[in-house]
Amino acid sequence: MLEILENNWLLFLIGQYPHGPVGGLAMTLFLAVVGLSLSFPVAVALALARLSSHGWLRGPATAVVYIVRGLPLIMFIFWTYFALPLLTGRTVGGVETLLFALVVYEASYLSEIIRAGIEGLPKGQTEAAKALGLGYFPTTFKVILPQVLHNMMPSLVSQFVSTIKETSLGYVISANEVTFAASQVNNQLMTQPFEVYGLLALTYFTLCFTLTSAARWLERRLAAERGGLGVQTA
Amino acid sequence: MGYVFDPAAVLTGQYLDWFIWGLATTIALTVAAWLLGMTIGIILTLVRMLPFRPLEWLVAAYVEYHRNVPLLVQILVWYFGVPQLLPRAIRMWVNSHHSEFLLAMVALGLASAAYITEDLRSGIRSIPKTQYEAARSIGFNYLQAMSYVILPQALRIVIPPLINQTLLLFKNTSLAMAIGVGELTYRTREVDSYTFKTFEAFAVATIIYLAISFGIMALGAFANRRLKLELR
């Protein structure tokens, strides 16, 4: 196992770079970070639309969230794979395809977290902001969302872990991330699949377990904060 | 470009058969993995309640592994990696009995078990210990207290998350296409590459997935309502 790591650690970490495109773990992290960051504004918009009093906003947003929740991510990836080149009129690489599919997929799940966060805040917050004369947007962006964001930090970290795990589907469309890199190593070696995929599992585990533990720590801190002084939620 | 959307083109003859086989395989894989996951999930829950700490840690490690490694990677480990470790005779047997289906079932079932045992544990934990003590003090024995007082309440709490788990499992069976299991997604790609009717093929699969997912979600919502009402 160590020998495999010794000979292939660079491929695992950064793919074929500098002789080819960046890949490996670097690409996995890039996809997860950029995917989640790009999906965040979409998720906020979806959550606000779902809570809107206008039916024409609420209806489509609710439909999107339900459709995404009802489909396997792989279906999304294939739809993107076929539809994106048609819509943009140019060839689209595996990484872009995966990124696009991830943004739509993550945005729907994230929007549910944000929506729950908004609904979880006491109604008095909105009422107080209105009483002070703030309109809808200042209320939402200056009063409600900052508190929601603070409260949802643990969920956000968990969602980041989910995103990291979901990037592994890049393997199916040959996007250059770490699972794909491992399959390349496996194809070269032929005889040690257990070691190669075991190493891959260990890589993901180390990364995700660290983050999951961080999420738990954040959760405890938030709980202490709420229980301790009660400043956050009055 | 004059593209005519024509779903009928992929819903005839052998293509229709492929979709039906794909759907049947998806359902078979879901049911098989669900049963395996439930069985192991219950066993793990019982094991971690035993008053012996090392066993609890082992179960915790099991849960953490399955939650922190992508399911696809778990499937790849089982499909490519594990047969290498098996004795030759067993490997031959597995290979001649649809190894991809069996190993996908094992991978999906074991991963579900990790989530199911977490749901079960939090369900049992949410029933206050005083309920048990009260049941014992009015003369119920352990089994009666469990079956008349604790479990009926715990089940109510556990059913909605378990239905959600079923939905996730159903969607995750699509990952088995990566190792060549002929389930719905795999068959859809096959129809696509034979007919070049990409959008029709994927539209059919999408509708099938959505129909079943919405069914499971509706069941979850129904269970949620029913069980909440009875608690009042």
Image (cartoon, coloured by chain):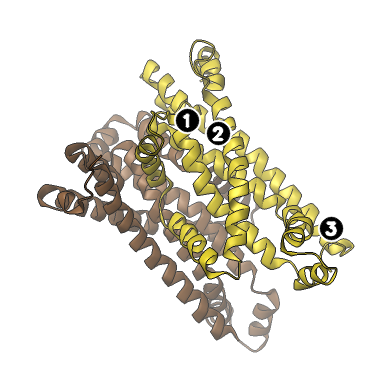
Q: From this view, report whether residue A44 is shown above or below residue B197.
A: below
Residue that appears at 42% across and 34% down: B77
Residue that appears at 56% across and 21% down: A13
Chain B visual colour: brown
Q: Position of residue B212 (x, y in %)?
A: 34, 62
Return the disc, 2 or 1, that comes first in the chain's sequence: 2
Residue that appears at 63% across and 84% down: B135
Q: Which residue is mark 3?
A: A225
Q: Is residue A188 left or right of residue A126?
A: left
Q: Which residue is mark 1?
A: A95
Return the disc, 2 or 3, that comes first in the chain's sequence: 2
Q: Tell me the chain of label 3.
A: A
Q: Do the dots labelled 2 and 3 sit on one chain? A: yes
Q: Tell me the chain of label 2.
A: A
Picture quarter with the N terminus of chain B: top left
Q: From this view, report whether residue B37 is shown above or below residue A40.
A: below
Q: Position of residue B154 (x, y in %)?
A: 56, 73
Camera-nearest residue between B135 and B76: B76
Q: Secondary structure at mark 1?
A: helix
Picture quarter with the C terminus of chain B: bottom right
* Residue at the extreme front: B1
Q: Which residue is mark 2?
A: A31
Chain A visual colour: yellow
Camera-nearest residue between B110 and A108: A108
Q: Do the dots labelled 2 and 1 sit on one chain? A: yes
Badge 1: residue crowd in 10 Å (few <14, some 14–19, many ≥20): many
Residue that appears at 85% across and 68% down: A132
Q: Do the dots labelled 1 and 3 sit on one chain? A: yes
Q: Tell me the chain of label 1.
A: A
Question: Which numbered disc, 2 or 3, marks the residue closer to the eye?
Answer: 2
Q: From this view, report whether residue A91 is shown above or below residue A122.
A: above
